[in-house]
């Protein structure tokens, strides 16, 4: 896949060109682990080797989410192996790095992202991979992009929504390395409001990965992020 910035009617846009990938990612081990520990939200969605199929999946997801009122890029043009998409602004990952020395601003952005995920779920949707690099922070609020995978090909909607919270927690946790308790507090309220099945699945993942989290807490910053995420989910 290749992504390039272009101008459409004088405004920034992105041309995303898909390529055939006959290798397929080796996700069998993760799938087996998720099945063995009865953790359906950790099952990986299929990665289609065909560029045309991956483009079709993303185009379909963009249209469905947009129709539901979720903020995603607009499809400006489309052909067999590419999409031209509107720009939604700087990524959440970029903004969090810029605000690293401003904890209150980090919390405000994190809360906005949490609210956007919860709103999408309330509309009957799931995101897929709502990690900071796949969230935008433009003037229109938090948006979502890079939607090549459809979790609903593998799991139920509650499982997919639980997966959203799990991946978001892991993705954001490194920005709370010094304040892991704050992350747990931020996630507590939306999970209390979530459907019982979603909350139960999230807690199950946190509990069953707790031993792994204890080991990870002794490692590098990225490993500690895993530990903080597991603890927050638990």
Image (cartoon, helix red, strand yellow):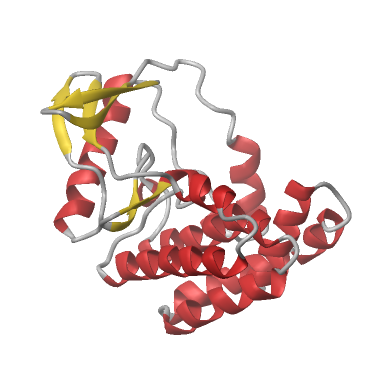
188 shown above or below 49 = below
Q: Is residue 177 left or right of residue 90?
A: right
Q: From the top left corner, tell me how far across and down residue 172 is, in percent.
A: 58, 57
Q: Position of residue 222 (x, y in %)?
A: 73, 47
Q: Is residue 228 left or right of residue 161?
A: right
Question: At 71% from the left edge and 55% from the top edge, which residue is drawn?
Answer: 225
Q: Residue at x 43, y 45 (%)?
A: 91
- Report the side of 170 relative to 162 (left or right): right
Against 62, is 201 above or below?
below
Q: Which one is in front, 125 or 16?
A: 16
Pick the quarter of the image with the N terminus.
top left
Write the residue at 38% across / 40% down.
149
User: Quadrant of residue 205 in the image?
Assistant: bottom right
- Tell me: residue 184, above or below residue 67: below
**Quick one: 106 or 233, which is closer to the camera?**
106
Residue extending farthest front: 101
Direction left: furthest residue: 9
At 61% from the left and 66% from the top, the residue drawn is 103
- Residue 200: x and y, percent? 54, 76
Question: How many numbered discs?
Answer: 0
Q: Which quadrant, please, contains the C terminus?
A: bottom right
**Which one is nearer the viewer's eye here, 146 or 158?**
146
């Amino acid at each position: 896949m290749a992504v390039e910035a272009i101008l459409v009617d004088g405004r920034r846009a992105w041309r995303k060109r898909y390529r055939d990938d006959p290798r397929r990612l080796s996700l069998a081990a993760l799938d087996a682990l998720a099945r063995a520990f009865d953790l359906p939200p950790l099952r990986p969605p299929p990665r289609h080797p065909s560029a045309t199929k991956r483009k079709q999946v993303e185009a379909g997801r963009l249209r469905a989410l947009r129709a539901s009122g979720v903020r995603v890029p607009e499809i400006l043009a489309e052909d067999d192996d590419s999409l031209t998409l509107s720009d939604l602004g700087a990524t959440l990952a970029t903004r969090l790095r810029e605000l690293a020395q401003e904890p209150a601003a980090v919390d405000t952005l994190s809360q906005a992202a949490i609210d956007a995920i919860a709103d999408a779920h309330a509309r009957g949707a799931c995101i897929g991979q709502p990690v900071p690099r796949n969230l935008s922070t433009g003037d229109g609020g938090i948006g979502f992009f890079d939607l090549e995978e459809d979790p609903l090909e593998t799991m139920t909607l509650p499982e997919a929504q639980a997966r959203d919270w799990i991946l978001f927690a892991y993705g954001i946790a490194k920005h709370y390395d010094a304040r892991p308790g704050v992350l747990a507090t931020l996630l507590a309220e939306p999970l209390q409001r979530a459907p019982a099945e979603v909350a139960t699945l999230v807690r199950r993942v946190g509990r069953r990965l707790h031993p792994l989290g204890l080991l990870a807490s002794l490692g590098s910053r990225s490993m500690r992020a895993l530990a903080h995420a597991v603890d927050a989910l638990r």
